[in-house]
Every structure is written in C-alpha cells, then in structure tokens.
Image (cartoon, rainbow, N blue to C red):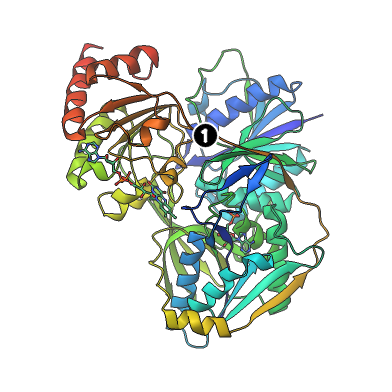
C-alpha cells in the first residue's frame, strides 16, 4: 500500500511574526511542521505499522529554507521525503490552487497512473488557514475526500471515519483511494527520539521539480498588522454588566 | 452582466440560518453592485414554506428536490451546484462558512475554474476582494481574485438583519444529471446530532470557559448561563485538554473560529491562540480574577473577580431579569 502525506511549514505559534516596511518580517520566526500535519503523518505511520508493505512518502512544496520539515517527517517514521519545487522559481506559492496543482503533479509524477491508496493532509495550515489545499488536491487527482477526520478505522476495503459537523458527528464510509485531512483529536503524535532524529539526518530528501506555468487564482493584495488593543470598560458588578448588555448592546432580547 | 448564485444548505430538511443570512447579505451586496440577478441553489427535499418571510429581495431558487440529495454527498452536490452555475451563466457563487461548504467549495473552484475567496467582502473595491485574518489573527490580509468566475465563502458574523417586505422568491425544480455508484463514494453512514443548545460555530451568544473554571463541574455554571441566554458553551484548549469539555467546543487556532454577537470569556487568560478564534466576535465580556490578564486587552467589558462568585450572581440577576420580561 502507498500512502502520500502532504506537510507544510508554518511559523511556530510562540514566535512573533513581525511587520517591517509594509511587509511580513519573518526574521524572528521559527518554522515548525504545521500541527495538523503531525496528526496526518502520525496516522499514516500507524497505518504502516498495522499493514505490512506500506510505504509512507511525505511531500512538501517548499523552498530550501523549509526543508527541515521533511527531516522531521523522516524522524517521525516516513520512509521517503520529497521536496517539491517548481522549476520556474523554487518558491512556495501562496495560492492554494497552485499549491494543490504542484502537489498533484508531484504525486502523479511519483506514482504514475496508479494513484496512492491514501493521501493524508492536515485540516488547515495555521498561518493562512485556507483549508483549501486538500479538497483541491483531491479534485485534481480525481479522488474522493473527507475533511477534518477525528477517528479512522479500517475493515477490509472500507475505511470508516468520523468528522465533526455543526452540532454533530458524521460517520462516513470510504474506499481506497481517498484523500483524508486530519483534525486535532485523531491521534496523539509521537515524540521523536534523539536517535530517530540522528538517523533522519543521514537519509536523503529527494527533490522533485514540477512545472507550474499557471497563474494564481487568488493573490494577496495587502497585509497589515491588526491593532488589538481596545479600551476595556471595567464594570464594578454583575448588575451593571447586565444593564450594559441590555441597554447599550441590546443583546438580551 | 453579473449573476450571483447562493448555495442554500439544508440538513434534515431545514435550511440553515447561516445560509439565509448569506442570501440576505448577497442581496445587500447586489444592491451596491448594480443589481445583478441573485438566484439560489437548494439541494434535497425541503418544505419551502419555512422560507416564507425569511429571505430578502427577489430571485429564483433552483431546487433539486430529490431523495438522493437529502444527505450531503460530495460528488452529487458538487455536480448539482456546478451544473446550475454553468447553465445559468453565473459569475459568482456564495456560501456561508460551514463544514459542508469547506468540503465542496474548493472542489467547485477547480471544476468551474473559479477564484475561491474566503473572508469578508470588501465593498469599497470593484475588484471583488475579501479580507481575512491570518497568522493567528495578528494580521489582516486582503485577497483579490484573478479569474472571471468567483466563489466566496462568507465568514459568519453579526446577527441576521430583519428582512424587509416586498421581495418575491420563486422556486424552480431542476433535475441534476445522475451519478453512477462509483461516483458517489464517500457515503455518509449516519449522523449523530447533539441534542439541545446550538453549536458554538453557529451560536449568537457564546459563554466560554478556561482553566479558571477549575474543573468540569465549574462548567455547569456556564451551561446554566448559556441556556438562559440561548447560547452555546465554548472552551479554551486547556479546558479541552484537561478533559473538561469535548473538542468540538474548543475555540481558537486549533479549534473553531467563531463570530457571535456576544462572547463571554470566563477564567480564560487570552492567549494569542485563543484570540485567533474570536477576532470577529461582536461584544467581548471578560470575567477574570487577574486584572492584568491579556484577555482584558481585547474585551469591551471586564469584570475582575472569581468566576465562582461572579457567575452565580450573574445567573440569579439574569433569571430575575428574564422573569420580568
Ligand atoms: C500550537 C498551539 C495551538 C493552540 N491552540 C489553541 C486553541 O485553539 N485554543 C485555545 O484556547 N488555546 C490554544 N492553545 C493554548 C494557548 O496557548 C493557551 O495555553 C490556552 O489558551 C490557555 O487556556 P486558559 O486561558 O484556559 O488557561 P490559562 O492561560 O491558564 O488561564 C487561566 C485564566 O483563568 C484565570 N483564573 C484562574 N482562576 C480563576 C477564578 N477562580 N476566577 C476567574 N478567573 C480565574 C487566571 O487569571 C488566568 O487568566 C494553543 C497552543 C499552541 C502551542
Ligand atoms: N506547501 C505545501 N506542501 C505540502 N502540503 C501542503 C502545502 N500547503 C498545504 N499543504 C497541505 O494542505 C493542508 C491544508 O493547508 P491549507 O489549505 O493551506 O490550509 C496542510 O495541512 C497540508 O497537509
């Protein structure tokens, strides 16, 4: 069985994303694997541990500066790591469509006409939070998809997954091949041992160039920091709070 | 000529409130943009009587009223919407932000070659751009489409405005092309809906608690308050990780992004990852024993005190208040 996992790098939530001369300043940013992608990769590795002969290949559409995420994936138990780059410029595109297109070309290039049995993604990236790449990728590959899964069980050829919807839980049956995106709660990602990290250093990260001449579908036209500071009005007691919510905000009707 | 199409989502025959507010907002938007034709697409059997008086403006609703569409099916739904969009030569497709939307819209964007934008529409530009918070809510980014066809996922916000009279909505049955069996995996086996209060993602009022609630029992106070206000209970990640509340209630970067009209943060410190989920909330009320807690930096109203003392008082006062009404 072949499993592809798509991972991306995001700023560590603890680090400060700066703003300099009208643009994002990454100089103080520490990048890490997108937290949702850790759930995705963990589930793939668990699959491999259950089903003999499974090969887990991790793909990241990333510039050289973000290659570290692939080493981490190897340390977590992936068999192969592939850095996807576009032959034109080597940057990671900002547009989810171009990202999905690049990944679909990389996956087709790797597996040929035979699709991987499973493609795991994270539910969303924590930087831009588009949550669009997994379904676009599925559509481009001609695969079904279930997003934001919180549990997964296989019996024979059927995979039963659960996902949260507004106000409830949906149980969905799918067959291979399918794209699944991971939500928090799916599993608890393992810690990587120092040993595993050292071993991963010795493994190679393959480079796969894809051509990407298409225009992005969406472009970022501007970005500005948000001033969070409001002036909080402290109220002395509960009675006054209720009065404000009722009269000033008209929220209790 | 622009032509707008709005997807109206139903579950169990009930059209979602979020879809209806999306429809009404698109009507407003249309009025500002040279009055393009607005139509709707509705999949699955519903009693259309429920929509009387709930929808503003004029328009046709294409209704694919078929048993096979009662429950969401990725491929069937995607086809119905794509077919309608193309048949009616629409230029823009609008969705409310829901789990179903997030499943379908990116597929549709690829299929009908549209730019997909999610966020709030910036009315001041003709470019049809949107703005959305990024990087845990610390930046506001503007996005513009490059393709002729556009799909918008409108972030939920602000309570639904009352609908002015005088509109006329017509329903037209449409017959989608059939899918074959191979086409229609995945299959939804069953859906278990939680009983009772609204989901945090949809609630108009959210009463959220964090570590300061002291334990699962502490949340009983929040449940009481929520039920008096007709709202939902939410939680910080700390409260969820401690097992006090289910993950479905987590708000923040790795939880839900919410946009209630009123948000109570009780015993929540206000970490950036939590704030990432409440950037679009209306009035924020913080109750915390620490006057310097960062949550007060984003709150409109603050009450410094122990939640175990403040909340019971607030609940009693509210009960009295509601009795008098
Ligand atoms: C990658 C990543 C993702 C994350 N995603 C999320 C997310 O989605 N959502 C989220 O919420 N967090 C998230 N976090 C965690 C976040 O960083 C904080 O740790 C968390 O929000 C803190 O929860 P809290 O406010 O309940 O607890 P604390 O920070 O411990 O705050 C408790 C507050 O309660 C107050 N308090 C204590 N006792 C009382 C009392 N008796 N009465 C009144 N007030 C009292 C204290 O003064 C304090 O302000 C994430 C972290 C990481 C690293
Ligand atoms: N550059 C990328 N390389 C590989 N996978 C990606 C990339 N960007 C996004 N993904 C995958 O798509 C998921 C959702 O990302 P997004 O649509 O950007 O929120 C992520 O969790 C990853 O699994």
Regarding residue B178, the answer to whether it shows in the image is yes
- Residue B123, by quadrant, is top right
- Of all chains, the one bearing label 1 is B
Write down the residue under mark 1.
Answer: B156
In this view of the protein, which residue sits in the foreground, B271 or B187? B271
The crowding category of the residue bearing disc 1, from other C-alpha atoms within 10 Å (few below 14, some 14 to 19, many at least 20), is many
Q: Is residue A5 visible?
A: no
Picture coordinates of residue B255 (x, y %)?
42, 49
Q: Residue at x 26, y 12 (%)?
A: B325
Decide if residue B239 is on the left or right side of residue A72.
Answer: left
Spot occupied by residue B208 in the image (x, y as percentages of width and height): 32, 38
* Image-quarter location of ligand 2: bottom right
For image coordinates 71% across by 73% down, the residue present is A108
On the rendered structure, is B11 left or right of B81?
A: left
> What is the total number of numbered labels drawn onto the structure image?
1
Give the residue at x 82% y 29%.
B1
Q: Mark 1: is the Cβ under 8 angstroms from ligand 1?
A: no
Taking B201 as reference, is B170 left or right?
right
Which residue is at a point 48% across and 87% down the rendered structure image?
A52
Relative to B106, residue B143 above or below: above
SS class of the residue under badge 1?
Answer: loop
- Tell which of A118 and A215 is nearer to you: A215
In this view, B324 is above or below B50: above
Q: Quadrant of residue A151?
A: bottom left
- Horizontal side of A66 relative to A239 (left or right) equals right
The image quadrant where one finds the C terminus of chain A is top left
Whole-percent x and y of residue A111? 68, 78
| Front residue of this view, candidates A62 and B82 | A62
Instruction: Please identify the quadrant where the N terminus of chain A is shown.
Output: bottom right
| Place of residue B105 in the rendered image (x, y in percent of width and height, measured from the top left) | 63, 48
Question: Residue B305, relative to residue A123: is it above or below?
Answer: above
Q: Quadrant of residue A5?
A: bottom right
């Amino acid at each position: 069985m072949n499993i592809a996992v798509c991972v991306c790098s995001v700023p560590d939530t603890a680090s400060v994303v700066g703003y300099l001369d009208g643009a994002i300043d990454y100089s103080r940013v520490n990048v890490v694997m997108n937290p949702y992608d850790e759930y995705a990769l963990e589930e793939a590795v668990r699959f491999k541990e259950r089903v003999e002969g499974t090969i887990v290949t991790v793909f990241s559409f990333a510039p050289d500066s973000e290659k570290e995420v692939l080493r981490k994936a190897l340390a977590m138990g992936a068999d192969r790591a592939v850095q996807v780059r576009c032959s034109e410029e080597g940057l990671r595109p900002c547009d989810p469509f171009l990202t999905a297109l690049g990944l679909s070309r990389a996956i087709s290039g790797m597996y040929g006409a035979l699709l991987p049995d499973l493609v795991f993604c994270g539910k969303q990236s924590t930087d831009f939070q588009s949550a669009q790449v997994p379904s676009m990728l599925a559509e481009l590959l001609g695969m079904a998809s279930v997003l934001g899964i919180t549990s997964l069980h296989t019996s024979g050829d059927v995979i039963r997954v659960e996902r949260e919807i507004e106000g409830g839980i949906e149980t969905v049956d799918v067959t291979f091949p399918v794209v699944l995106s991971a939500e928090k709660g799916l599993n608890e990602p393992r810690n990587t041992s120092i040993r595993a990290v050292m071993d991963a250093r010795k493994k190679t990260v393959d480079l796969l160039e894809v051509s990407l001449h298409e225009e992005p579908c969406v472009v970022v036209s501007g970005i500005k920091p948000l001033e969070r500071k409001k002036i909080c009005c402290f109220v002395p007691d509960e009675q006054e709070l209720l009065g404000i919510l009722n009269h000033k905000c008209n929220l209790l009707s | 000529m622009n032509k707008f199409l709005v997807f109206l989502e139903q579950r169990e025959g009930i059209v979602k409130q979020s879809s209806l507010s999306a429809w009404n907002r698109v009507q407003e938007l249309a009025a500002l943009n040279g009055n393009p034709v607005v139509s709707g697409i509705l999949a699955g059997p519903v009693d259309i009587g429920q929509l009387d008086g709930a929808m503003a403006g004029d328009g046709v609703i294409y209704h694919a009223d078929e048993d096979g569409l009662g429950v969401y099916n990725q491929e069937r739904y995607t086809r119905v919407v794509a077919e309608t969009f193309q048949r009616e030569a629409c230029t823009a497709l609008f969705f409310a932000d829901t789990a179903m939307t997030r499943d379908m819209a990116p597929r549709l964007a690829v299929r009908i070659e549209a730019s997909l934008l999610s966020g709030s529409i910036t009315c001041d530009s003709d470019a049809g751009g949107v703005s959305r918070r990024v990087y845990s809510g610390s930046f506001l980014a503007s996005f513009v489409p490059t393709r002729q066809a556009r799909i918008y996922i409108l972030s939920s916000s602000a309570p639904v405005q009352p609908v002015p009279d005088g509109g006329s909505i017509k329903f037209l049955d449409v017959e989608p092309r059939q899918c074959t069996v191979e086409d229609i995996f995945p299959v939804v086996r069953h859906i278990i809906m939680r009983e009772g209060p609204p989901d945090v993602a949809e609630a108009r009022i959210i009463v959220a608690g964090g570590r300061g609630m002291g334990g699962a029992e502490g949340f009983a106070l929040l449940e009481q308050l929520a039920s008096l206000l007709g709202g939902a209970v939410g939680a910080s990640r700390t409260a969820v990780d401690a097992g006090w509340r289910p993950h479905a209630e987590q708000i923040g970067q790795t939880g839900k992004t919410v946009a209630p009209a009123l948000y109570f943060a009780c015993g929540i410190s206000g970490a950036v990852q939590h704030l990432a989920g409440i950037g679009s909330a209306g009035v924020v009320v913080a109750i915390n024993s620490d006057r310097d807690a960062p949550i007060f930096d984003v709150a409109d109203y603050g009450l410094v005190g122990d939640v175990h003392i403040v909340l019971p008082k607030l609940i009693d006062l509210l009960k009295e208040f509601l009795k008098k009404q």
